[in-house]
Structures are given as structure tokens and as C-alpha cells.
Amino acid sequence: MFDNFKMFCIRSIGPKALLRHQLRGIPPLLSSYPTLRPGLSAVKSARPFSTTTPTQNQAGSTRQNPTILLQDKENGFGFARSNPRPKKPRMKGVTEIRGPYYSVMGKRYLADVLETMGAHVDGLKFAGGSFSLFEEKALRELIELAHEHSVYVSTGGWAEHLLTHADIESVFDKYLLKCKDLGFDVIELSSGFLSIPADDWLRLVDKVHSHNLIAKPELGIQFGAGGDTGAGELEAIGTSDPGKLITLGQKFLDAGVERLMIESEGITENVKSWRTDVVSKIMKELPAERVMFEAADPKVYNWYVREFGVDVNVFVDHSQIVQLECLRRGIWGMADTFGKIVSYRPGV
């Protein structure tokens, strides 16, 4: 079994990356073989990222993959044509949703979202350090509720704030320890407001992995992105070469990062015209299943699904789950996608 696992790792991330992981003591693609993760039994609530797993008391629960009416051929709407979707845990067609930021979200609110649409949600992402404004009990309830529905939980961007502190190493260690204690699965690493050498960014990835957390770097072409900066200010700053994003993204994947987040600003947000050329280059040069695009605008995720199909990974607002899933399933859409989103998967 170990030989098969080793071959899988070599095919997935390359022999150089596998060797680097072995030298660093970091298991590659942890989510793909969580049972082989070193010391997993000793890690409280450890959950993989791209292959989310239910909490222990929810193992085998129908909450992970409930039968929706669209799939029920005997008593539901299964007679209608729709695109089949991979069951959780999903490696592609992943939907990550925004948690509390533009609106407040408590346990009852999130429970309503996940009890009705949890089958279509893979990840929950906080933003802008919003989780730090909660009382601990309330935050733990949100994280535990997400896990009950096999939804991983990401910090969203906040690491860049911590990296400006004087005692960076101590502060960042405390951050990771507390995030692990709270039950977070994914630590997003963004540098939209910072200029940081690639090797240092890779060290941060290693640091996150050493705490049995999953590092998710956020990459973009727009400096100053990820905040509330106006379009005019961003345009004045200018954008970087997409090749830089591709090169850095490949380094992250070689270092064992499972999925990259692509920042929307400078590409489809706060721009006069969309940089579809950048998206095309990303999809050409990097593995599609290991890239996720910020797309919290109906026109944007409509374009992504139209151009790259139902398996594209996107981040949207929690208010957009239903519309996005209707689009993926091919049962609704806009003028350019209605009745046009299809897949061919015999036997699924």
C-alpha cells in the first residue's frame, strides 16, 4: 500500500517535491491519504483540506452527501436532466463560501445555510480577521457546525497583518497554535499588501504544515488587493506580470500546497475590463483542480463555469450558493449559459 501511495505522490506533485517533503518531514497531499498522516491520531480535530471529512461523531452521516430532490428518480425531480456532481469529499468543482464579513453570521444563520444547502458547500472562509471579533464559544460553535456538514474552515486573509509585527516568529506561532486549538483547517497566506521574497513565503507554508494545518497561498497580479482599496487607486499602482504568479504558484505546488487561491482584484474585480488572458494562462500552466478563483459576483462565476466547465473551483459569497449550484447542475443560468452547461459522465 505504501508503494502505491508513494507513486501517487510522485505523479501528483513530482519527484523533486516528494524528496523535499521527505527531507522536511512534511507529508505530501495530506488530504488524499489522511490515514497515513504522521501522528494523526494525536492531533485533535485534524481535518484535511481538499478532501474534507466529517467530525468523528458524524462519520457515516447523511449530512455529508444527502439525497437532494434533483437526484431522487423515484420520489423527487430525478426525471429532469442535470449534471451529476462529485460527492464529498470533492477534489474538483469545489465551492468555498464567505462567512461573516459583509453580514453577521451566527450559529443559527449558518445552520440554516448548511441544513438546506450544505451538500453543495465544501469550505467556509472567514475574511479580514473577522473571526477575531467573536467570543470564543460562538466561534467554536460555527467551526464545529461546519465540520458536522463536512465543510472545511479557512481563516481567510489575516496573516499579512501579523507579518508586520516586530516579533514575527513568536506572533505567527501563537496565531497557528490558537487557530489549531479553535479547529481551523486552512490557513490562508496572502501578500496582497506586502512584498515578501518567495523563499520566505515558502517558509511560511512549511511553518503552517508543521502545525498540521493546511496552507493556502493567495496569489494575484494586483498589489494592494484584498482590502477595500478603490479601483482608481489600484489602477494607479499597476499590476504585475502574470508569469510571476505562475512561477510562484508552481513553487507552492512543488512545496506540497494542495490548492491556490487566485485573487480577483486586477483580474475580474476593480478593473475596466476583465483580464481573461491571465485566467487562461493560469489554467494552461497550473493544474485546474489545484486552483480556486475568487468569483463573488454572479457574472464572474457564470463566466468561469461557461469557459471552464462545471469542475472549476470557485469562492463565492454564502448568498450565492444556490445560483452557483443551479448553474453547475445545468438547470438554470444566464442568457449565455441557460441550457448550455453540460457534462458527459456515463454511469455517474
Image: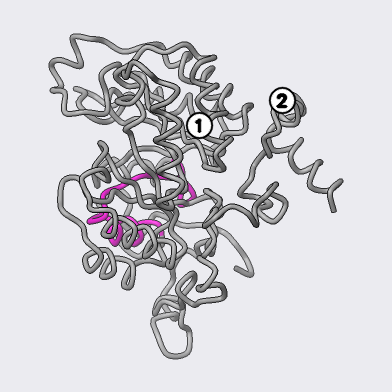
For label 2, the residue is 20
Q: Which residues are magenta?
A: 308-328
Name the side, left or right, on which 51 lies relative to 150. Answer: right
Is residue 70 shown above or below 39?
Answer: below
Left or right of 8: which side holds 89?
A: left
Circle 1: is it few (<14), some (14-19), or many (20+) Cα within 10 Å?
some
In percent of the image, x 56 and y 34: which residue is there?
257
Q: Is residue 36 magenta?
A: no
Vertical side of 257 occupied by 161: above or below: above
Amino acid carrying label 1: it is Met
Q: Is residue 78 left or right of residue 251?
A: left
**Marks 1 and 2 in Cβ contact (< 8 Å):** no
Residue 269 versus residue 181 in the image, above or below: above
Q: Residue at x 56, y 39 (%)?
A: 258
Quadrant in which residue 220 is drawn: top left
Say what secondary structure mark 1 lies in: helix
Give the total of numbered labels: 2
Q: Which mark is residue 303?
A: none
x, y percent for residue 115: 33, 72
In percent of width and height, residue 16 lies at 74, 24
Q: Amino acid at mark 2?
A: Arg
Q: Please state the horizontal and vertical placement of residue 112, each as a whole percent of the image.
A: 26, 70
The part of the image, by quadrant, that contains residue 290 is top right
Left or right: 194 as drawn, with respect to 23: left
Q: Nearer the viewer, residue 295 or 144?
A: 144
Foreground disc of the pair 1, 2: 2
Q: Residue at x 28, y 54 (%)?
A: 136
